[in-house]
Image: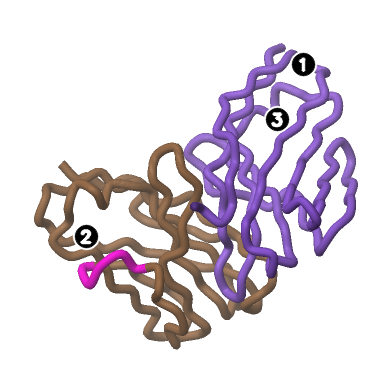
Amino acid sequence: GAGVSQSPRYKVAKRGQDVALRCDPISGHVSLFWYQQALGQGPEFLTYFQNEAQLDKSGLPSDRFFAERPEGSVSTLKIQRTQQEDSAVYLCASSSRTEETQYFGPGTRLLVL
Amino acid sequence: QKEVEQDPGPLSVPEGAIVSLNCTYSNSAFQYFMWYRQYSRKGPELLMYTYSSGNKEDGRFTAQVDKSSKYISLFIRDSQPSDSATYLCASQRASKIIFGSGTRLSIRP
């Protein structure tokens, strides 16, 4: 079956622009996670949803970062007033239940100029 | 100090060699340990998963956890060029996976 998909795959933004990154989880997966991966580093946790409820947003680096999953399936990560330090790969993962295996999408590569 | 530390490499070995990848962790409460493989421009994929101390073998791959020394290892036997990737060790706390920085591995034909 289809895996986790993310769009766009690549995004170039000018500093100060708002961006929206989309994640389509595996069908039926209850839990959805966002991670940020800087160049040469491992992914770092940003936030987590169980269905439509955002249960943990402790990893969001600032109030410019906002995530939603209004109908418990597709999720959007929004970054307002992008800064150069926001340049990274943003990974989405989903799992059938919270502590089950997380399956990762290919990521969105964001470059802020 | 990061909770999971990993030598970033890069590591280059000839085809057929045994590869040893290692990590240390600082949180003694960690119980679950994973190894992920990440190819260039792809998301991480789960390779091995172990609970607490001990060894786990899957084909050419063996994962080893020593909780007394907080040391995690992955061994790859008969390494192949297709094993060239970045390997990430990780542990899990509730909903979060905590990753090491990854070791870039290259297998020379």
Disc number at residue A19?
A: 2
Q: Give the residue type that dot 1 points to.
A: Glu
Is residue A52 a member of the stretch shown in magenta?
A: no
The chain under label 1 reads B
Residue density around tag 1, few if under 14, some if 14–19, many if 20 or more, within 10 Å: some
Q: Give the residue type that dot 2 points to.
A: Val
Residue at screen point 17% across, 52% down: A83
The N terminus of chain A is located in which quarter? bottom right
Position of residue B91 relative to residue B95, above or below, is above
Q: Earlier in the sequence, mark 3 or mark 1?
A: 1
Identify the residue under disc 1.
Answer: B15
Please indicate whether residue A12 sits to the left or right of residue B6 in the image.
Answer: left
Q: Position of residue A43 (x, y in %)?
A: 48, 52
Identify the residue under disc 3.
Answer: B83
Q: Give the residue type that dot 3 points to.
A: Asp
Q: Give B78 or A72, whichever is nearer the viewer.
A: B78
Query: Do the CB atoms of the residues marked 3 and 1 lie less than 8 Å apart?
Result: no
Chain identity for the colour purple used in the image: B
Residue density around tag 2, few if under 14, some if 14–19, many if 20 or more, within 10 Å: some
Q: Which residues are magenta?
A: A60-64
